[in-house]
């Protein structure tokens, strides 16, 4: 039996985001009723080109409640795409948006709501967690900026595991590890609180149990439900408390070197966890217990067994970029439980680039 470790003996502040969550197989059938609750009469349905057929099918079932489909959502929420979508929104006489998809599509819905404060309903189909955060990252002239505002938080989220049965295995794994990263950083956040920490541990547990099943049997309905449940919890942590070194490094690698979002999170997570393991030992203990005691090494082994990408080299980063990445990462660092030191960060990036195991920590 694990010894009880008090996590929150001191004071804390806890702000929970006021979103409505509708969870369950077949719940996409509740979209029309949920639009009514939001007093939305004509919703513009958003998707990526890849999920256009699903967006068209959803619009079809909504009849007059759908104002049309805008299927050009793309990574990093470029402002030009948002402006085109805003014109489509006005031309269609829409009074709300439905984002059907992952973080890219949800980002577009948030960008529209940030500009016109329209209600957002999200039908979430990945594990990235953007649907439960009041955070928007957008790009203009190649520069990514992040804003936080109440209007950005979607009002209603529908999680229907049936819509994730076809999420490719590779993306399920990296997206699941991306979700776990929110939880790992959530438990040692400077503004951590007992509710967020409970959600973090339960979210990681659900994903730890579900992902190996999904790799073997991608259409396993129970595992898909558990993974989406875990993703909701981990995303809620991301929306509730501040993130640290791991998210900073991933933003640097994505923003300055154009590495793919979920894959970068999954390569980096064991290394950033190991970096912080000693400094955040108590906070990380419940998660370490889920992975055999050493969280960084345990996550690395877990990712390897799931067939996740294991190195920044495989994601296309040049070895000559590592020094610049370390330099950028230590400029304006986020708060972190262990001081962010340039040489140690460069060493961490070197191991992640090679695909070597992380240093053994907690
Ligand atoms: P994504 O939304 O870019 O999706 C990747 C691809 O998978 C797309 O083509 C998409 O259409 C497809 N896809 C999605 N769900 C599918 C399904 N169930 N079946 C088949 N295909 C499916 O990927 P993502 O990882 O969800 O989102 C990444 C983006 O979200 C990044 O830009 C990231 O910065 C952002 N993000 C933002 C926040 C936030 O809080 N603001 C949080 C997490 C991620």
Image: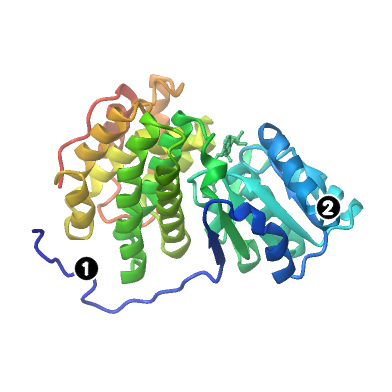
Specify the farthest residue to the bottom.
11
**Rendered residue at 22%/60% (across/down):** 283
How many C-alpha atoms fall within 10 Å of the one at disc 2: few (<14), some, or many (≥20)? few
Residue toward you, 170 or 219: 219
Residue labelled 2 has its Cβ within 8 Å of some atom of ligand 1: no
Mark 2 vs mark 1: which is more N-terminal? 1
**Rendered residue at 88%/55% (across/down):** 90
Residue toward you, 216 or 237: 216
Q: Secondary structure at mark 2?
A: helix
Q: Which residue is mark 2?
A: 63
Q: Secondary structure at mark 1?
A: loop
Q: Is residue 287 above or below residue 21?
A: above
How many C-alpha atoms fall within 10 Å of the one at disc 1: few (<14), some, or many (≥20)? some
Q: Which residue is mark 1?
A: 7
Q: Quadrant of ligand 1?
A: top right
Residue 22's spot in the image, x, y percent? Answer: 56, 62
Residue 326 in sight here: no
Q: Is residue 51 above or below residue 137?
A: above
Q: Is residue 223 above or below residue 18?
A: above
Residue 268's spot in the image, x, y percent? Answer: 35, 36
Q: Is residue 281 left or right of residue 67?
A: left
The Cα–Cα distance between marks 2 and 1, rounded to whole angstroms, is 51 Å
Q: Is residue 340 left or right of residue 288?
A: right
């Amino acid at each position: 039996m694990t010894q009880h470790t008090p996590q929150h003996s001191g004071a804390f502040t806890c702000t929970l985001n006021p979103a409505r969550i509708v969870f369950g197989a077949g719940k996409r059938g509740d979209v029309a009723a949920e639009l009514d609750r939001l007093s939305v009469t004509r919703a513009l349905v958003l998707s990526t080109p890849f999920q256009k057929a699903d967006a068209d099918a959803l619009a079809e079932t909504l009849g007059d409640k759908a104002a049309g489909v805008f299927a050009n959502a793309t990574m990093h929420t470029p402002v030009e795409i948002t402006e085109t979508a805003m014109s489509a929104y006005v031309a269609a006489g829409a009074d709300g948006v439905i984002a059907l998809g992952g973080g890219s599509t949800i980002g577009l819905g948030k960008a529209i709501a940030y500009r016109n404060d329209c209600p957002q309903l999200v039908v979430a189909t990945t594990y990235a967690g953007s649907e439960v955060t009041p955070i928007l990252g957008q790009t203009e002239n190649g520069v990514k900026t992040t804003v936080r505002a109440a209007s950005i938080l979607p009002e209603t989220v529908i999680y229907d595991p049936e819509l994730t049965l076809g999420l490719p295995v590779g993306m399920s794994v990296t997206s699941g590890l991306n979700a776990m990263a929110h939880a790992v950083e959530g438990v040692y956040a400077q503004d951590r609180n007992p509710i967020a920490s409970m959600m973090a541990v339960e979210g990681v547990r659900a994903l730890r149990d579900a992902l190996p099943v999904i790799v073997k049997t991608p259409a396993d309905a129970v595992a898909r439900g558990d993974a989406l449940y875990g993703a909701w919890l981990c995303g809620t942590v991301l929306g509730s408390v501040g993130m640290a070194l791991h998210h900073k490094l991933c933003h640097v690698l994505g923003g300055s070197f154009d590495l793919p979002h979920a894959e970068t999170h999954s390569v980096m997570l064991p290394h950033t966890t190991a970096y912080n393991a000693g400094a955040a030992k108590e906070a990380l203990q419940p998660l370490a217990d889920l992975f055999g005691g050493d969280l960084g090494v345990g996550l690395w082994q877990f990712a390897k067994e799931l067939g996740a990408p294991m190195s920044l080299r495989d994601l296309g980063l040049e070895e000559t970029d590592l020094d610049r990445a370390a330099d950028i990462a230590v400029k304006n660092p986020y708060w972190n439980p262990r001081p962010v030191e340039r040489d140690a960060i460069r060493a961490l990036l070197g191991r992640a680039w090679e695909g070597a195991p992380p240093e053994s920590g907690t």
